[in-house]
Amino acid sequence: MYISYETTEWTEKGLFGKHSKPYYDPAYTVPKKLPKPKFMPNKLVRVSDMQAVDASQLNEGYCAISYSWNQSGHIFLDEKDGKYKRKDEGKHVLIRSRGSINDHAIYSVDEEEVRFTDIIQQICRDIRIKYIWYDQMCLPEDDEHKRHELSNMHHIYGNAYCTVAFVPEFCTDPGSYIKTRNDDQYVLGSAFGNYQWYQRLWTLEEALKSERLLFVGKDAHRWGNDMNSSYGMNILSQKLDSLNVSEILWHAHQRESTRKHDRVFALMHLFPDLITDQISFDYKQPIEDLMVQFYGLLAKKDISILYFQKPYAYKSKVRDYDFLPSWTGYHGEHNHDINIKSVQMPKRRKRDRFHDYVLSWFGVHKEENIQHSYEQQSISTKKSMFQNYDVIEKTLHVTCTYITNDQPNDFDSLTFGEQDVPAFPHRSSKQTNYYNLCVAVHLPGTRKVKHLYVYRTTYRDLAHGSSKENEFKKITKRLQQLSTFMEIKKESMHWDDDSEPTKLDLKQLTEGVDDVSAKYVLLSGILFERNNSMFYPVIKKSQGEMYYKAIGVCKIENPHTLLSNRKLPEKEFLIQ
């Protein structure tokens, strides 16, 4: 793919909203001499003549360039070695404009077909960059030294004064031109989620590791800290240390990579303290082993990897990697902006966990329940405080409190009909008012009755309405869903005018809970919070299977009324 770059750049400096003004000399430039960082790459490109130089001989800092490889030329697959390669035929377009800022007039426009290197040089000259790290010229050609330099990518981008993110699609909107008395104005494009740079996996690491980001487009530029949520770039305003695994995977799983191994290599340096020393940067190793190892290390970092739901905003780029365990969320969609609240419980000794693991190989499973009181801590954090788990190869071992129905499911007994409509107790109120139809349940370890929301309707519609049969079917389905987690009796249903009942929302699960022969478990000991809503992981064990399968999260509104004042059982679950 070939792109264009104009030397007349528009930006929003000094103006409110999204309106912009033109700068023939760019509004944003870097200092004349950059401070030298502690880490320097092996090579840098001297912008004046675009020659690679030994960085150790320099006494000043540098900038780095981030771009989509697909936009740097013609990308093709070499059938001889099976590698993707780039061919630059010099068809990029450099547009040089001449004019006057005072009268907003452009006197001349020169267009020239150039190579991608010339585009990079012009951008650097415009922003007054003297030395740039540009992978095409700074990475060694031999594989061994190239792998070593690639292993330092997080240092290269992390120590650059700024990273220039070249996004050719970022430009003025031709239909938004406004000529005023004092200025010309455009609205800058904001659909960053559709841009190549945003869709590539390597650029995620480059952006998150950079101290500063300067976005340069075809005819517009802007600093990263000015890119608000309307640009879809809110992750760039957050420090890497504040992000949990689920948030990073939410961004990573919607991005593309040319090679499958890059799904690991492009992310692993986001966690250098955890992963770098344990993963070999080798494209020849089996992709299955590499990805299972990588996701296992991510799970050990924090349990937020279990926070995923059915695809909604995007289709995961790893959804076809069915060799991955279900707890990786490869078949769903992770989420961002979540907090993880811990449920306090004693941590098991590693010896006990290993002992149970050995027994499992011989078909012996620990089934006894350990009683612990439920105590919800007030601490809410981006990083997981839940530590009572381990990852052994493809198996996630989790020990926590849970809710499940140990009795065989009998969906037929929960068929709801006209004879099951409970008596309406609110004689003083109109039967046309909406009320909550609830069911009383007894959970293990509690003496108090808990009330769960089933359906919201009016007594008249349910007892005499023309669509009552359709409503009966909805209520039946809802009762059957709830019965997978706790014992449900139709006789325990009643009307309730509580405006905030306890609700179990199963719509975000990656699959339904309608398998009568399967066992479903809500892991009440692992709590995620997002937008003041509470979410709990749900797992499923099919008949005859040894391991559970993670199927997303269940949203519970007002969970404290359901989970308080009771002693919860605790058990170990093996999830694959």
Image (cartoon, grey):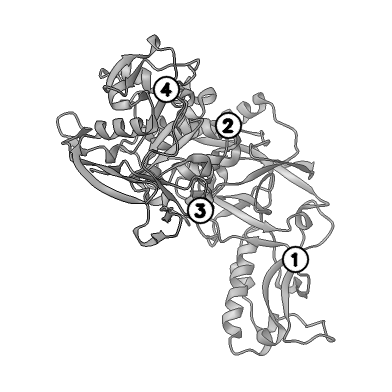
Which comes before the other along the chain, label 2 or label 3? 3
Cα gap from disc 4 to disc 1, whole angstroms: 57 Å
Question: Which one is in front, 134 or 223?
Answer: 223
Query: Which residue is at the far top?
Result: 57
Which mark's residue is nearer the viewer, 1 or 3?
3
Residue tagged 2: 301
Q: How many marks?
A: 4
Callout 2 secondary element: helix
Callout 3 secondary element: helix
Callout 1 secondary element: loop
Which numbered tag is attached to residue 271? Answer: none
Residue tagged 3: 230
Local crowd size for mark 2, using a 10 Å CA cut-off: few (<14), some (14–19), many (≥20): some
Residue tagged 1: 500
Which comes before the other along the chain, label 1 or label 3? 3
Which numbered tag is attached to residue 62? Answer: 4
Residue at 78% in and 74% down: 497
The answer to whether the residues at label 1 and label 3 have Cβ atoms under 8 Å apart is no
Question: What x and y, as percent, mark residue 277?
Answer: 48, 19
Tell me: 414 left or right of 181. right
Query: Which residue is at the far front?
Result: 103
Cα gap from disc 3 to disc 4, whole angstroms: 30 Å
For the N terminus, give its image quadrant.
top left
Callout 4 secondary element: loop
Which comes before the other along the chain, label 4 or label 2? 4
